[in-house]
């Protein structure tokens, strides 16, 4: 039977009987309040669908939701419930949206297939990097580092999440110089690549900033979705004709406590609805706290059929170097972006060699050859493994 309403799953820690805790969530997030109110009974009341241990499912009537309004969705499924005194901890684990709400959003203009066509990269993972040092470089220095990475074979270079339009590296000059360098590299080597320029700013100016970046030649935009908001991402996706790289900075405040907050899976679903092309979802092996099951769930939520929305690249990043490529690709497969910052620029022989080592590690995985064996015939990879191991 076709799902009509919204079903949210929560993991709850409480001294209350679980049925009473679940009913408190359902009431707080729909028609209830702390005391008896005339006319509180309503067809719009949420209901407890199931209880399994400390996991509860709440069904919210679809009429509670304003189609196309992600901030309002979150106010319902992730609102005041986190402040309920009777609940010691509560985590929004997942949410299932009906087709009517999913189709109220256009999703990505540029999904996996469209992004691949732009840079002629098929049947393999994409390999990316972030400019290092993260901040402090001027536009010319940024372009030099970015160009060196693409000369080594990388498909994507992104800004740091903290780099926007500061005086030491103005966005417009940065875009002009990076894209000019990319043109030089492409003319010399044939290699095409994305530059994800960070246009994160207030909702009232983000489209104008994006248009200024596009006027200077940008071929991909980047947005910090949790600090700018899902509406900012959706405005970009609807208003511009470029792929959008979505960073999840600040997500740990919501996702890291496995017993409280909001799971990365929920964020992934909302990013796909709002129109991201790429989304940082976590590494299987790296420096950041990770949850293998949640990585799998995010991967599938971004790439499985979902009422016709285009598929989104999951991005593995955070402490990745060539020795950790295989472990991440075993989890994500071909349709992902594996991204290394220090694992490229920290190579003993510099950025271009570090980029080549990352590409070689991907080639080893695609060939089914152990990375240590592949390194015997590829000097850049060998040097990287000597430095960082596997």
Image: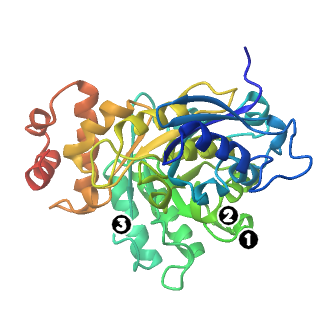
Q: Quadrant of the C terminus?
A: top left
- Compare residues 1 and 363 and report the one nearer the observer: 1
Query: Going 9% across and 33% down the picture, which residue do you hit?
Result: 373
Instruction: Locate residue 223, reporting x and y percent.
Output: 58, 60
Using the rendered image of the protein, determine whether residue 308 is visible from the camera's viewpoint.
yes
Query: Going 34% across and 54% down the picture, which residue do you hit?
Result: 151
Proximity of marks 2 and 1: CB atoms separated by less than 8 Å: no
The residue beneath circle 2 is: 210
Using the rendered image of the protein, determine whether residue 190 is visible from the camera's viewpoint.
no
The local secondary structure at tag 3 comes to: helix
Of the numbered discs 2 and 3, the one sitting upstream in the chain is 3
Identify whether 288 is placed above or below 326.
below
Q: Name which quarter of the figure residue 352 lies in.
A: bottom left
Query: Going 77% across and 36% down the picture, which residue do you hit?
Result: 101
Q: Please indicate whether residue 128 sits to the left or right of residue 197 in the image.
A: left
Proximity of marks 3 and 1: CB atoms separated by less than 8 Å: no
Q: Nearer the viewer, mark 2 or mark 3?
A: 2
Q: What is the residue that sits farthest to the top in this orientation?
A: 1
Of the numbered discs 2 and 1, the one sitting upstream in the chain is 1
Measured Cα–Cα span from mark 3 to mark 1: 29 Å
Judge the density around disc 1: few (<14), some (14-19), many (≥20) Cα neighbours within 10 Å. Answer: few
Measured Cα–Cα span from mark 2 to mark 3: 23 Å
Of the numbered discs 3 and 1, the one sitting upstream in the chain is 3
The residue beneath circle 1 is: 205
The residue beneath circle 3 is: 145
Q: Nearer the viewer, mark 2 or mark 1?
A: 1
């Amino acid at each position: 039977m076709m799902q009509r309403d919204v079903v949210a799953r929560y993991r709850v820690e409480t001294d209350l009987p679980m049925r009473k805790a679940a009913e408190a969530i359902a009431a707080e997030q729909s028609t209830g309040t702390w005391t008896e109110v005339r006319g509180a009974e309503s067809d719009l009341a949420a209901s407890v669908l199931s209880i399994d241990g400390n996991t509860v499912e709440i069904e919210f009537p679809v009429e509670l939701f304003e189609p196309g309004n992600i901030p309002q969705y979150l106010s319902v499924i992730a609102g005041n419930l986190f402040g309920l005194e009777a609940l010691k901890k509560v985590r929004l684990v997942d949410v299932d949206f009906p087709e009517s709400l999913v189709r109220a959003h256009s999703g990505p203009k540029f999904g996996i297939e469209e992004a691949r066509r732009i840079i002629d990269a098929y049947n393999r993972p994409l390999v990316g990097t972030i400019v290092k040092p993260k901040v402090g470089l001027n536009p010319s220095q940024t372009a030099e580092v970015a160009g060196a990475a693409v000369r080594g074979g990388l498909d994507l270079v992104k800004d740091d999440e903290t780099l926007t339009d500061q005086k030491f590296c103005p966005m417009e000059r940065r875009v002009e110089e990076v894209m000019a360098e990319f043109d030089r590299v492409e003319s010399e080597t044939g290699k095409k690549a994305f530059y994800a320029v960070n246009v994160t700013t207030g909702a009232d100016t983000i489209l104008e900033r994006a248009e200024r970046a596009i006027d200077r030649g940008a071929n991909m935009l980047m947005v910090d979705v949790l600090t700018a908001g899902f509406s900012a991402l959706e405005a970009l996706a609807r208003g511009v004709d470029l792929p959008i790289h979505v960073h999840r900075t600040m997500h740990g405040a919501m996702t890291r406590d496995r017993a409280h907050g909001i799971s990365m899976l929920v964020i992934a679903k909302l990013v796909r609805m709002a129109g991201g092309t790429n989304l940082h979802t976590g590494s299987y092996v790296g420096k950041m706290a990770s949850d293998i099951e949640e990585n799998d769930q995010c991967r599938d939520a971004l790439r499985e059929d979902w009422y016709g929305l285009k598929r989104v690249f999951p991005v593995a990043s955070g402490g990745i170097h060539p020795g950790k490529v295989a472990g991440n690709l075993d989890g994500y497969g071909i349709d992902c972006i594996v991204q290394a910052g220090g694992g490229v620029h920290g190579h003993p022989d510099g950025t271009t060699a570090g980029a080549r080592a990352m590409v070689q590690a991907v080639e080893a995985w695609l060939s089914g050859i152990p990375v240590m064996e592949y390194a015997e015939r590829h000097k850049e990879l060998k040097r990287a493994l000597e430095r960082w191991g596997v």
